[in-house]
Image (cartoon, helix red, strand yellow):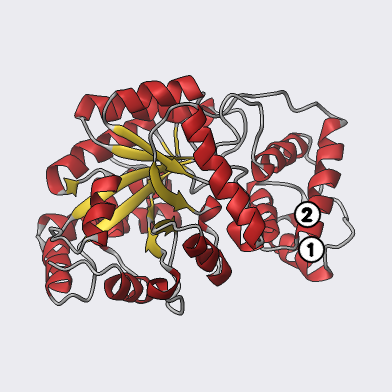
């Protein structure tokens, strides 16, 4: 038996991970995970289904820039997930699950659907062959303005630009519009505000909740600095429409909208939301791709106004990372369903994956239980 080095065992993060994996393994194989879930479903305190959300399926070493920590699963871990999920869960195509929810059909406990956001190229090259191999259905949400173009999301361009500055050991610059508090927080992440992975994650998370004017100032400033070192090359990062057509024809992959421009819906006015939805649907129709009339909010971000406007557009289902109780979907016509984000920290150990699927938040489950209208 191989012994772990003593210095590794003394590392608190490694120790915490090992304890977490042991407890998850014990809970799953003793039946505690399954029994607790079944008991909650029987009491109707939770819904019997879950919807999983993956993004990148790739080894981060093979990507042209540093990926967000919670955005990827390696192909090796994803294959392990598919074997495990196929054995222990009932996997339904998303369209079938949504139909059952909408029509109040019976849904068995431990039912789940698998979804992917953004339609990155790595889905075609790594995830799609594995889904074919195990005949597991999945739905891909496509930001329809990106296939067959060198366009990139603003946060990915910024992440790449900051990575260039990181390689030169450069400090984060003083930028008009960023408060002293912003720099105080950054100084706790990195001495002298030298750019590192923690700083990159902090900056992008901060900008996601900032006014567009602040975001644009920071984006333009960083892009200008990085371009003095090296120009960011054009890169076709998303599936082409021909790839999408091929995957649809396989019979196991379906598609739905991730918006057209991948702009956060909480920042859009009614006319802009109408444009995002109508344009994305027209793009599917233009390329003769049948699609599910549902929407995954870009980056999972939305607000009450978003849902009201989706109701106006007659979108029955929207998918997000969390739901908000105060929205009345019966009034607005749109039901928001929570998805479970799966990243490498979860996917690398199947029993932790199971625990993550079973874990629920009181608010989201209360919302879905009351408004999705599905019963056992």
Mark 2 crowdedness (10 Å alpha carbons): few <14, some 14-19, many ≥20: some
Q: Quadrant of residue 359?
A: bottom left
Vertical placement of residue 33 versus 257, above or below: below
Mark 1 crowdedness (10 Å alpha carbons): few <14, some 14-19, many ≥20: some
Residue 332 in percent (x, y) is at 45, 70
In the rendering, which numbered label is found on residue 183? 1
Residue at the (29%, 24%) spot, across then down: 250
Vertical placement of residue 171 versus 242, above or below: below
Q: Earlier in the sequence, mark 2 or mark 1?
A: 1
Residue at the (70%, 54%) spot, across then down: 203
Decide: marks 2, 1 in contact (CB < 8 A)?
yes
On screen, residue 178 versus residue 322, left or right, reads: right
What secondary structure is marked by label 1?
Answer: helix
- Depth order, front residue of 298/359: 298
Q: Quadrant of residue 76?
A: top left
Figure label count? 2
Q: Which residue is mark 2?
A: 193
Residue 32 in percent (x, y) is at 13, 65
The quadrant of the rendering that contains the C terminus is bottom left
Vertical placement of residue 301 versus 254, above or below: below
Residue at the (68%, 46%) spot, across then down: 196
The quadrant of the rendering that contains the N terminus is top left
Residue 213 in percent (x, y) is at 81, 58
Distance between mark 2 and mark 1 Cα atoms: 8 Å
The answer to whether residue 328 is seen in the rendering is: yes
């Amino acid at each position: 038996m191989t012994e772990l080095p003593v210095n590794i065992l003394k590392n608190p993060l490694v120790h915490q991970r090992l304890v977490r994996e042991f407890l998850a393994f014990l809970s799953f194989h003793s039946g505690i995970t399954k029994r607790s879930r079944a008991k909650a479903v029987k009491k109707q305190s939770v819904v019997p289904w879950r919807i999983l959300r993956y993004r990148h399926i790739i080894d981060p070493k093979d990507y042209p820039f540093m990926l967000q920590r919670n955005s990827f699963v390696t192909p090796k871990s994803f294959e392990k997930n598919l074997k495990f999920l196929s054995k222990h869960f009932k996997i339904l195509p998303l369209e079938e699950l949504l139909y059952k929810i909408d029509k109040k059909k019976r849904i068995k406990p431990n039912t789940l659907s698998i979804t992917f956001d953004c339609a990155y190229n790595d889905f075609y090259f790594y995830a799609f062959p594995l889904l074919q191999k195990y005949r597991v259905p999945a739905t891909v949400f496509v930001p329809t303005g990106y296939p067959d173009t060198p366009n990139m999301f603003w946060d990915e361009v910024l992440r790449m630009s900051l990575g260039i500055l990181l390689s030169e050991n450069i400090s984060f610059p003083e930028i008009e519009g960023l408060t002293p508090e912003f720099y105080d927080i950054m100084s706790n992440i990195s001495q002298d505000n030298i750019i590192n992975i923690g700083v990159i994650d902090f900056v992008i998370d901060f900008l996601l909740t900032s006014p567009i004017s602040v975001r644009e100032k920071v984006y333009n400033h960083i892009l200008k600095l990085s371009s003095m070192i090296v120009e960011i090359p054009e890169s076709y990062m998303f599936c082409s429409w021909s790839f999408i057509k091929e995957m649809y024809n396989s019979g196991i992959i379906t598609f739905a909208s991730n918006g057209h421009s991948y702009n956060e819906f909480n920042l859009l006015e009614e006319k802009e939301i109408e444009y995002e939805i109508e344009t994305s649907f027209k793009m599917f129709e233009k390329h003769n791709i049948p699609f599910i009339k549902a929407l995954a909010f870009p980056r999972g971000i939305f607000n009450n106004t978003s849902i009201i406007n989706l109701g106006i557009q007659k979108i029955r289902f929207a998918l997000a990372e969390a739901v908000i109780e105060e929205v009345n979907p019966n009034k607005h016509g749109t039901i928001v369903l929570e998805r479970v984000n799966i990243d490498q920290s979860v996917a690398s150990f199947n029993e932790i994956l199971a625990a993550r699927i079973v874990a629920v938040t009181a608010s989201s489950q209360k919302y879905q239980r009351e408004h999705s209208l599905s019963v056992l």
